[in-house]
Image: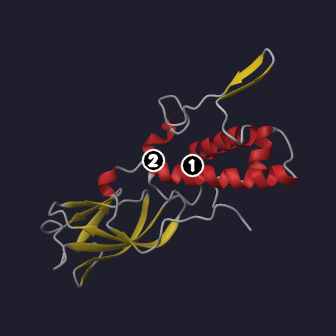
Amino acid sequence: MAFASTDDLGEFLGETLTGARLIQAEIFLEIVSAGIRGWTRQDIDLVEDDVVVLAATGDWELELPQRPVVDVASVTVGATVLAAGSGYRLAGDKLYRTSGGWVGGPDGLITVEYTHGYETIPRDIWGVTLQQAAQMLENPLGYASEGIGTYNVTYADNADEPGGPMFGLSRYRCRAASVPMHRERPLSWPVANG
């Protein structure tokens, strides 16, 4: 699902999108949204009852890979389901063990079922989605520069460099160390509708 609608993009560009341009807009919004998910390593959207399997660290804290964490439904260590509030506590995107460290079962793994993400897409993500999709709509082949006669245009390509729009989303980016070992819900999103 795209982080912005074609209506939003039309308003951003100051035009009504129709025909082939509307279809391109839908595709570009999906591409940009998938790019943001990939760059941040985050789903961003609200995901309920996601299941991840994480390696036991032996530490008191266990970082969940997707943020923000809305709710933890269950934590299973080996074959033991920990009682909420008595076996662990949630603080931000981390689970803290109330007694001892996070030591997995025989396989050294911990299974967590939790809800994470944003019910309403943050405005900065929405804005970057519109900005990048508009740029793609105006320059679909991604030319660095083009010209006719004495008229020349050079397009910027600094999306994830300091000052670039993706760089502004750095606070959403997941550290590679918290990537799960296994995830029941695959990381896949449709690129375009029909």
Q: Can you give x and y, in whole percent of width and height, for residue 133 in the image?
A: 68, 44
As displayed, is residue 157 above or below residue 192?
above
The one nearer the camera, 104 or 19, is 19
Q: Can you give x and y, in whole percent of width and height, for residue 105 in the image?
A: 18, 78
Secondary structure of the residue carrying tag 1 is loop
Q: What residue is drawn where x is 61% and y is 41%?
A: 128
Q: What residue type is labelled 1?
A: Pro
Q: In which quarter of the image is residue 79?
A: bottom left
As displayed, is residue 149 above or below residue 122?
above
Numbered circle sitting on residue 192: none
Secondary structure of the residue carrying tag 2 is helix
Q: According to the image, label 1 marks what residue? A: 122
Numbered circle sitting on residue 172: 2
The quadrant in which the C terminus is found is bottom right
The extreme bottom residue here reads 79
As displayed, is residue 178 above or below residue 76?
above
Q: Which amino acid does label 2 sit on?
A: Tyr
Q: How crowded is mark 1: few (under 14 residues within 10 Å), some or many (20 or more)?
A: few
Q: What residue is drawn where x is 29% and y is 53%?
A: 177
What's the distance in space between the residues labelled 2 and 1, CA to CA? Answer: 10 Å
Q: What residue is drawn where x is 12% and y is 67%?
A: 100
Q: Can you give x and y, in whole percent of width and height, for residue 140 in the image?
A: 71, 42
**Left or right: where 5 falls relative to 185:** right
Q: Can you give x and y, in whole percent of width and height, for residue 159 in the image?
A: 55, 36
The one nearer the camera, 171 or 145, is 145
Q: In which quarter of the image is residue 72?
A: bottom left
**Left or right: where 83 falls relative to 130:** left
Residues at circles 2 and 1 in contact by the CB criterion of under 8 Å: yes
Q: Residues within 10 Å of mark 2 (few under 14, many from 20)?
A: some
Q: In which quarter of the image is residue 41?
A: bottom left
**Left or right: where 149 falls relative to 178:** right
Query: Which of marks 1 and 2 precedes in the sequence?
Result: 1
